[in-house]
Image (tube, grey):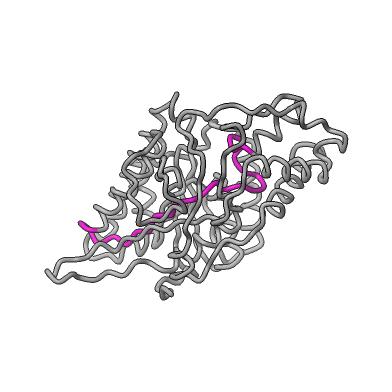
Amino acid sequence: MNRTNITLKNKTVLVTGAAGFIGSNLVLELLRTQSPINIIGIDNMNNYYDVSIKDYRLREIEKTASQYLESKWKFIKGSISDKALIDVIFSENKPSVVVNLAAQAGVRYSITNPDAYIESNLIGFYNLLEACRHSYDDGQKGVEHLVYASSSSVYGSNKKVPYSTDDKVDNPVSLYAATKKSNELMAHAYSKLYNIPSTGLRFFTVYGPAGRPDMAYFGFTNKLIRGETIEIFNYGNCKRDFTYVDDIVEGVKRVMQSAPEKKNGEDGLPLPPYAVYNIGNSSPENLLDFVTILQEELIRAKVLPSDYDFEAHKKLVPMQPGDVPVTFADTSALERDFGFKPSTSLRDGLRKFAEWYYEFYLKK
């Protein structure tokens, strides 16, 4: 087990992508469990998907923050690709822990809109690394731990499963994956050169209430409500390691409190205080089984009528460019070092999503 070497209480934490799916849930969890805490959130609030969901998440944070008056929550609308803004945030707030969840996500969007990925995922991440580096200037204590989102997409078309962080990941099949692998390489270089403790987390297909509408479960629901046909890729022969958002957040919270230790090698030079972990359910679900559970839970939550004809709205199609047939996380390192393994069942997670969907879209 890694020892906890960072106390989050009374610390200043910067969460980028704070209006995003994982970011907003992390902020809520930190307010509930780590108060008193000072959280600064930044998000560019772009319209890659329905901004009303981001507004909803921010309202939930405001509501929760108002219950924990000993804690501070500040939201900044802006982009991590704005270097001047990032430098101001660091100089004024001096965060002890930085969690970078801001990124342009999505494999398919990266095929048609590559600029967004370079700007946010590469330039934005570089700006944060530089700000972390300079946080130690003039003998300041600086950033104690940089935690950042990587992705299961880095595994590309690896044939070996489950995916282990020991595997070579030099053959990305999308620009999105290439940017995430680049984040890991950049973080390693900065950890080595400037002794910045950093941990990358490879997330596996995160889902749950108020999630991203570009994810399959959300998109399928939208289409079924409109009576449209859902396309199931690779003729249903896909497996995904679906991970419920609360499990992801619990993993992130534990990792935040255990920075890789600074130590020197035999040559007297610093060894990079650097780590990468998978966070996934480590039990991949077949896409067709997933669709069956989703439809049952949508009926149960009254999102769809009990006599809905699913077969008439399903179409099996070939694999999409940039996609992979299976994602499967080896989470043994996460279990070993943090005593944690995601455990929410797909049915429980999709039930919570369906109930949220009814409340958010249909009840009013």
| Residue 93 visible in the current orientation | no
Quadrant in which the N terminus is drawn? bottom left
- Compared across the picture, whether 328 is left or right of 63 comes to left
- Compared across the picture, whether 260 is left or right of 210 comes to left
Q: Where residue 4 appears, x then y in whole percent?
A: 43, 74
- Say above or below: 4 vs 162: below
- Compared across the picture, whether 57 is left or right of 72 comes to right
- Say above or below: 78 vs 131: above
Tell me if residue 209 is in the magenta stretch: yes
Residue located 54% across and 64% down the image:
341
Quadrant in which the C terminus is drawn? top right
**Which of 356/174 is in front?**
174
Range drawn in magenta = 192-216
- Compared across the picture, whether 54 is left or right of 126 comes to right
**Which of 60/148 is in front?**
148
Considering every residue shown, the one lying at the far left of the view is 267
| Residue 46 visible in the current orientation | yes
Q: Where residue 46 appears, x then y in whole percent?
A: 51, 33
Tell me if residue 132 is in the magenta stretch: no
Res 137 quadrant in image:
bottom left
Residue located 83% across and 46% down the image:
300
Res 55 quadrant in image:
top right
Res 315 quadrant in image:
top right
Count of all numbered marks drawn on residues in the image: 0
Residue located 55% across and 58% down the image:
249
Residue located 70% across and 47% down the image:
353
Q: Where residue 269 appears, x then y in whole percent?
A: 15, 66
Q: Where residue 190 appears, x then y in whole percent?
A: 25, 53
